[in-house]
Amino acid sequence: MLNGFGDMAQHLGLRRHATSLRKATTVLSHELTTGQVKDQTKHLRGDFSELVAIDTSIAKATSRVAVGQSIATWLSVQQNSVAVLRDHAQTGFDDMLLLQQAPENEQKQRMLSGMDTRFGDMVKLLNTSFGDRFVFSGTRADAPAVAEADVMLDALMNEINAASPAITEAQELSDFIDQWFATGGGFDEVGYLGDAPIPASQSLAQGYSVGISVTAQHEAVRQTFAAFAKGAALSRGVFEDDATEQKRFTDIATMAMGGSRSSLIQLAAEIGTSEERVQNANAQNEAERYAMKIARSELLEADPYERASQLERAMTQQEMIYSLTARLSRLTLLDFLR
């Protein structure tokens, strides 16, 4: 029980000090647990310049990592499409070899029909997208890269049939198809729906700039289209009345299919080089971000030995205040802590 104003004043003073100690104990416990100071302003003496610089570096590194991951995904989708396309070219080459040995029967007709289908499969691969972006369309990533297979093949065959003078030899037809898919040919007018390659390389890290310039107008893609178109032309009956020229054209188409596979291997290597640069840039950015996070942690680090000592003193003082308060007011520990 309290006696007089002096005891009351002493009691209130002890309670205020106890409240302050409880707050200090909470802060010290937090800092001891997290290893970081709670009051940054006090710890840094009001100078946040170094902390701001570190946070800015972390934000920039994080942004570069995000951009790098996006580009890596884009390149990965392209690489996967080229890999499947390369497999189609190999299968097409094998089928063309078999076609040269196939007799005039239903088996040959089925194999010829497969050439037309293979051209359509190539179109689907080049119109691959992730999210809402078509990866072979260049700067016009919101649109498919190439027209439908029938649109291109119909346009090509119409031009072949309308050629003057008429095409009567296998090599002439092969050259015509190559020119149609070459720069400035019918493919650029009818087939390609995208736009120019993405011009600028993206700087991802110090010493690492990466471009994603491969489109469906890439030379390797043009060669592959031409090779598949030659197979499709066979399926649509070119030289069906001239067995000799049809045989020659089949030989030419077979070689073209084999050559397209080699071109696709080079394209895969080109994309792979960009993928490696992105990977290295991302590793550098991740290392920088990690280093900056360590620097930030060290800047705001709470000395564990100092905090442990301060916490022990605060708790000791709380025990002393409890004892004094209990004597003054005969409080229980539960009452004191309320």
Image (cartoon, rainbow, N blue to C red):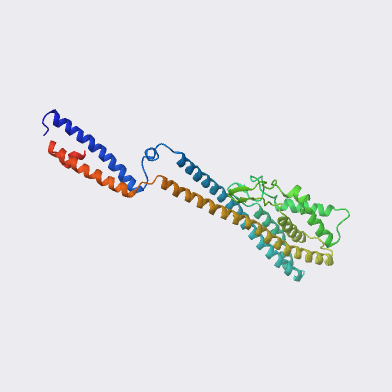
Q: Position of residue 117 (x, y in %)?
A: 69, 59
In the depicted structure, whether residue 51 falls above or below residue 100:
above
Q: Is residue 306 above or below residue 116?
A: above
Q: Residue furthest right?
A: 165
Name the residue located 63 percent from the left edge and 60 percent from the top edge.
83
Q: Residue at x 51, y 47 (%)?
A: 62
The image shows residue 231, relative to residue 197, as above or below, that is below
Quadrant position of the C terminus in the picture: top left
| Residue 257: % across, % down | 73, 63
In which quadrant of the rendered view does residue 12 lie? top left
In what quadrant of the picture does the N terminus appear? top left
Residue at (15%, 31%) from the top-left corner?
8
Q: Is residue 235 left or right of residue 60?
A: right
Total tally of numbered discs in the picture: 0
Residue 313: name its quadrant. Answer: top left
- Residue 301 placed where, x, y %? 38, 46
**Nearer-the-camera pick, 310 or 233:** 310
Viewer-proximal residue among 48 and 164 = 48
